[in-house]
Amino acid sequence: MDESEPLAELHVHIEGTLEPELIFSLAERNRVALPYSDLADLRSRYEFTDLQSFLDLYYANMQVLQTAEDFADLARAYLTRAARAGITRAEFFFDPQAHTSRGVPLSEVVDGLADAVAGARAEYGVDAAMIASIVRDRPVTEAHEVFGELMRLQAPVIGLGLDSAEMGYPPSLFEDVFARARAEGLHITAHAGEEGPPEYVVQALDLLGAERIDHGIRSLEDPELVARLVDEQIPLTVCPLSNVRLRVVDSLADHPLRRMLDAGLSVSVNSDDPAYFGGYVDDAFAALQTHLGLTDEERTTLARNSIRAAFD
Ligand SMILES: Nc1ncnc2[nH]cnc12
Ligand SMILES: [Zn+2]
């Protein structure tokens, strides 16, 4: 891949870019007592057995994020690193309910992130945008409340997403919230087919109006769905390092990325939660080259797919 080729990252959770060092420095700034003796102790916990085991640590670590300044520092650190990874466009998720549910005002979250986004093009050469994500294992009523609050604040978000624990929380639960988002002119994307069945991907498309699918790798189990995704060129934002660390696939060498490309699916490579899964997008490309024999031509296709799948 020509390193100067434009590249978009479309599937990254800003809270998943919270590096261990920043956890400790924000804990000190905000006088938060961490349940870890030191960095090594924290790092020793980055061993996951499934999505839920990761989410437990991901949400616990967010307690250090309290003020707009904290959220701005978090996003600036990501954008600095994203620029180094060659990313020219970043559409990142944030989880409003993960913060409001522990008493952090939504305005602090949005103001801090928006501050970093506003300066991103000039400061880092990265065109950045925010996507609010509904935390699907929390009450549907809360999803409606937080969406209303985002609209009242006129939060500068380009879209609405759906994330967190997938199994048992089908997209169908959130049909009405996503109808409201579409009525507001927001773009729609949803995590589906990560741990959940192909049926959840179908629901995300048909019931939520998803324009992209985050992960979507279990779509491969349903040939009819694959044919549709190819036919409609629905972008799938795939996260290979995440899939291995959360044991959705056994190893990078076994990752279905090449099969997906060969099937004609519109796939891109993304980092998901890079502070937790062993690397950013450049690290993912390097690992894919080593373990999957990803070619320069395939890298170019993946980069072009990412730009085509960007919302704005
Ligand atoms: N990989 C993932 N799947 C679902 N929700 C998430 N939130 C952060 N990372 C996630
Ligand atoms: Zn994700």
Image (tube, rainbow, N blue to C red):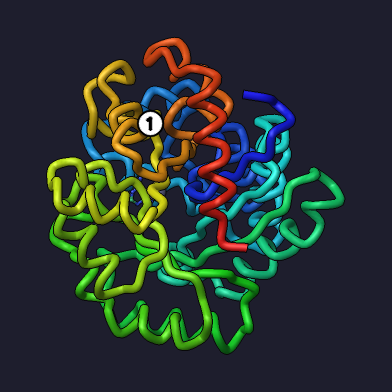
At 40% from the left edge and 58% from the top edge, which residue is drawn? 212
Residue 164 rendering spot, x and y as whole percentages? 32, 56
In the displayed orientation, state which residue is furthest to the right: 122
| Horizontal arrangement in the rendering, residue 64 relative to residue 292 (left or right) | right
Foreground residue among 101 and 97: 97
At 29% from the left edge and 66% from the top edge, which residue is drawn? 205
Foreground residue among 114 and 25: 114
Location of the N terminus (image quadrant): top right
Q: Can residue 165 be spotted in the picture?
A: no
Placement of 158 over or under 241, stated as above or below: below
Residue identified by numbered label 1: 240
In the displayed orientation, state which residue is furthest to the front: 231
Dividing the picture into quadrants, the one containing residue 243 is top left
Residue 43 rendering spot, x and y as whole percentages? 44, 25
At 58% from the left edge and 89% from the top edge, which residue is drawn? 152
| Horizontal arrangement in the rendering, residue 218 relative to residue 157 (left or right) | left
Residue type at tag 1: Pro
At 18% from the left edge and 51% from the top edge, which residue is drawn? 196
Q: Can residue 291 be spotted in the picture?
A: yes
Dividing the picture into quadrants, the one containing residue 200 is bottom left
